[in-house]
Every structure is written in C-alpha cells, then in structure tokens.
Amino acid sequence: MSASELPARHAELMDGVYRWQRHIYDLTRKYYLLGRDQMIAGLDVPAKGTVLELGCGTGRNIVLAARRYRDARFFGLDISAEMLETATAAIAREGLSDRVALARGDATDFDARALFGIESFDRIFVSYSLSMIPGWEKTVSAALAALAPGGSLHVVDFGQQEGLPGWFRTLLRGWLRKFHVAPRESLRDVLESESRRSGATFRFRTLYRGYAWLAVIRQSKG
C-alpha cells in the first residue's frame, strides 16, 4: 500500500498525537510499556535472518534488536511520518542505516515486496501497537501471511490487568484513552485462533499480574 493510499484519518491522527510527543516518547514510555525487552530477548533471530517490526514508532525497539542480533537485517513499518522521522534519525545516529530499512505503511494491509523488496521475514514483532490500530485483527493476519516457513510472530501489549486492583485498571484505562490506546480484551483469543487456523504453535505469558501480555506464534517449517 502506497503512502497516498494510507487510511488518511488514522495517519493524520497518529501524526497529530506524536508530532511533539515523539521527542520525549522513549523517556516517558519506558516506565509503563513493560515487557518490550523480554520480547526482544526472545526473538532468537537466526543467522543472517530478517526481522520486521510493525508499528516501529521511534525506532527504539529496532535499535535494541539490531544491537543484539548483529548479523540480521531489520525492517520497520509505521503509519506516522512524524514517528518515522524520529526513527530514521535514531537509526542513523546508531550507525545502523546499512542494516535497517524503514517505510511508511498500514500494518493492517501492507505489501512487503513493494515496500522493502522482500516477501517474507524470519521474525515479525509488534510492540504496544495493536492497542492503537483500528482493525488490529487484520494486522495479526497480515503479519502471519508475511512470515517465512519456521518464522515467528512476537506480540507484547497491554493485558487486562487481571491480577491488579480495580482502581489501578480504571486509572490506567483513563490515561491511555488520552493517547487513543485501548487494551484489547480479545487479544489472546484472536492470536490463539489465528495460530490454529495457520497450523502454528502458540505460547502466551502474562507479565506483572496481567499488566502486559506476551505471545509468540511460530509457523511450522514445512
């Protein structure tokens, strides 16, 4: 999908939300976007592997993953031009431009070959983006369709805070709404259903008493 075909309303919304926030995003989000580093550590990228992040934002996760998996190639997709500007600068600053490529696109409907010249990826990850994407279920389907045989999809996002006090959940949900974020109650069910449909294996973990959910869908090699 070309930039001119992006869902205009959502792209405009994300640019508006992050036009100024992108400058302090990583500093503030490190306190409540929990589980991201566990997800990166669990990618276990194969030698000379290819990795795609959907909703790459400021590039924080790609930079950390590229440092950890030094012989892999990385690709990042985001609908916000503002976020991509910050991510591009961060990647250049880290000297990673030769291994990381970014593109503007819709995570629910993207053409990897048109955007990156590659059809499938060994690893795809989505970090705290499904809770912001309208029609997020399509992102899961699109990601699985773009996995290479034996590849895996890694997702970390807000859980339902099932083990935390009700007052905490109420305060958190109110805060997140200010940034157009909505924890997905059906996230686990959708991921598990999609894994069954594609004949993949499914692993799921709750973190910090349900504050965050971490899931991995792994495709068969055959």
Image: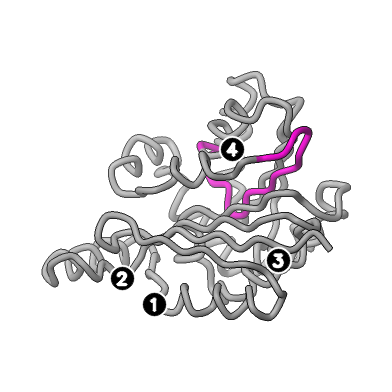
On screen, residue 108 above or below 39: below
On screen, residue 73 above or below 144: above
Per the image, label 3 sits on a secondary structure element best described as: helix
Q: Earlier in the sequence, mark 2 or mark 4?
A: 4
Residue 140 place in picture, x, y as percent: 62, 69
Residue 178 place in picture, x, y as percent: 31, 63
Q: How far apart are marks 1 and 3 (CA)?
A: 20 Å
Residue 78 in the magenta stretch? The answer is no
Q: Which residue is rendered at x = 75% and y = 59% of the image?
A: 147
**Cβ atoms at labels 1 and 3 below 8 Å apart:** no
Residue 94, image quadrant: top right
Q: How far apart are marks 2 and 4 (CA)?
A: 26 Å
Q: Say which residue label 1 marks.
A: 185
Q: Say which residue label 3 marks.
A: 144
Per the image, label 2 sits on a secondary structure element best described as: loop
Question: What's under tag 4, amino acid-wise?
Answer: Ile
Q: Say which residue label 2 marks.
A: 160
Q: Earlier in the sequence, mark 1 or mark 3?
A: 3
Residue 181 place in picture, x, y as percent: 39, 65
Q: Which of marks 1 and 4 is nearer the N terminus?
A: 4
Q: How far apart are marks 3 and 2 (CA)?
A: 24 Å
Residue 9, image quadrant: bottom right
Q: Which residue is rendered at x = 68% and y = 48% of the image?
A: 52
Residue 35 place in picture, x, y as percent: 39, 48
From the image, state whether disc 4 or disc 3 is nearer to you: 3
Magenta span of residues: 45-60
Q: Which residue is rendered at x = 46% and y = 73% of the image?
A: 188
